[in-house]
Amino acid sequence: MRVRNLGILAHVDAGKTTLTERVLFATGATYKRGEVHDGTTVTDFDPQERDRGITIFAAAVSCDWAGHRLNLIDTPGHVDFADEVERSLRVLDGAVVVFDGVAGVEPQTEAVWRVADRYKVPRIVFVNKLDRPGADLTLVVESIRTRLHVEPLVTQLPIGVEGALAGVVDLVGMRRLTWLDGILREEPAADADSRTARKALEEAVAERHGGALDELGRMSDATLRRALRDLTVSGEAVVVLCGSAYRQIGVEPLLDAVVDYLPAPAGNPGTHLAALVFKVHAARTGRLTYLRLYEGTLRKGDIVWDATGQRPERISRILRVQADRHTDIDQATAGDIVALAGVKASRPGATLCTREHPVLLEQPRTAEPLVSVAVEAHTPADGQRLGPALAALVDQDPSLSVRVDPETGQTLLAGLGELHLEVAVTKLRRDAGLAVTVGRPRVAHRETVVRGVTGFRYRHAKQDGGAGQFADIVLDVRPGEGFSSTVTGGRVPAEFVRAVEAGCREALAEGPLGGHPVVGVQVTLVDGGTHPKDSSELAFRTAGKLGLRQALASCEMVLLEPVADVTVTAPTETLGGVLGDLAARRGQITDTTAGTVTATVPLAALFGYTTRLRSQTHGRGTFTTRPAGYRPAA
């Protein structure tokens, strides 16, 4: 059977999970439509997802359509869980990006679009919720063109507007598709508006595709489909479809578009194994390891090699996944996305292969934690279980980290945001059964150089009876990035230069202002000297570490704090209070339009903002955030 591996991507509340539910229903994978508001969806199976009404964890499901097996991953839309999206996109061959028909391009949609650009994942667009008041396909298409810098090719038009939405016109097949009580009815589209729109689509495609240009004016449906597929796979344009997932409108033609336009996975099942782990989940039945096979075949009982962790792993079971339900299969081949039982230690980003033919696949990026909380157990018994429980959390989610504060001795759990940490702590309490106390959130600061130093000399000389240590280095430190050497004449051999660089990287882990990591610094080794007997890589590494620490202490440094781009939507009559509150939180207002305010705000000032905004707007205000880097702390 032919395969499509795709993700469903969107900003929170654009309708991803509802669309996934309708896809499962339309393909016969489920017999009943699940609803987010009822907590009955297949993919939002975790109790926290049902309690909160949002997708938190990427969930994999499979279904069949038109002779193809579709492996779908429903991804989170909230910014705090962007790392789940990153890891999913790394293993997918295509994606359906869902847009709210009223809101258009939203902050998290833009963020996941850029991640898909980085991994070169072909996409098609589904403009959802066109049955809502204020929905406008034309405005959404224009926002895609201007904000995402891609050419949208509109292949469908809505039949009816807002609450009167009844179906769509398929401009490729020239069909009027209408739904009544979820039942699809089809008839030819012969009206003048449809013919005009088809002509405009042909012209837009012909501008970008030579084969279509040759048939301009007499373009067949087959040629148009081939051209749309080519443009989708190359990323030169994006196909736009529309409808209302909640009312089942547009779902079946979207499935056709997935088969027609998104690529099939490449790979040879007969060659050596190459697979990438992208998710680990602690299920009730044990640890499940999700992976994508790129090459080769994996069989139950195989012993594979974790090339990242440098350890063997035995495959006890191979599972076809349907959210929280699993079906045993005997083998998986190139292109498959499956879960494994029996894998003990492989983490997300690990490459599984054969020991005789090792290979390392590109790992997905892992975002740096921005917020931390102190976690303490209530009882000594829980204290003994807290460490393993935290280690299990980090094992499943690489964007979490755990460390012990050297000054206070507190255990600090760090993540991407307040909600991210709330979910992690709830898992400690609910899944691990731990009674824990959580401190106030703290942000992760950084330090940087404002004014550097040149010609800073550091000499490391140590003599304690045996072989001594000697290293002489001269450093320039200034704002910038990276490490370089301008030493000539062999005054510092190349292996010692590399040792100095390693020592400098260690020194950047703790800055002079408060022990925070140092960023935005350029270090240049400009001179140095050696001893014929006492110089070594260890001596120069130590000199690099201690020398740069002293050099940074002589620089003019500044403390940086994380900031976020915030978009607030609220009733017009409450915007004055919203603006004043954002200013009080040290926010820099970047734009105000009817009912919307955008600002850049220190992340630390956003703790508790949800409650404050609800109070100011009588429960009618909402906001979204997106990480915006660091700026000097006030």
Image: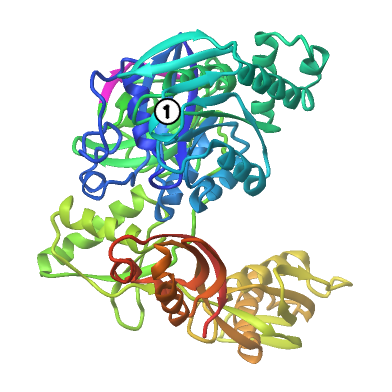
Residue 64: percent from left, percent from top? 39, 15
- The residue lying at 52 percent from left, 85 percent from top is 634
Write down the region rendered in magenta. 326-333
Note whether residue 147 is visible: yes
Question: What is the magenta segment's predominant secondary structure?
Answer: strand
The residue lying toward the viewer, choosing from 393 and 534, is 393
Say which element carries label 1: loop
Is 400 a magenta residue? no
From this view, report whether residue 408 is shown above or below residue 225: below
Residue named by callout 1? 165
Q: Residue 384 vs residue 23: left or right?
A: left
- Say which amino acid is labelled 1: Leu
Q: What is the basis of the colouring in this image?
A: rainbow
Residue 14 lies, with reference to residue 217, above or below; the image says below
Q: Quadrant of residue 453?
A: bottom right
Residue extending farthest to the right is 489
User: Relative to residue 104, is residue 61 drawn left or right?
Assistant: left
- The residue lying toward the viewer, choosing from 113 and 557, is 113
Residue at point 34% right, 68% down? Answer: 613
The residue sitting at 41% across, 72% down in the picture is 578
- Local packing at callout 1 (Cα closer than 10 Å; few below 14, some 14-19, many 20+) is many
Percent x, y for residue 232? Answer: 64, 27
Name the side, left or right, on which 105 lies relative to 479: left
Q: Is residue 327 magenta?
A: yes
Where residue 322 sits, quadrant-wise, is top left
- Relative to residue 70, is residue 215 drawn left or right? right
Q: Position of residue 514 (x, y in %)?
A: 48, 84
Return the residue nearer the eye: 401 or 236: 236
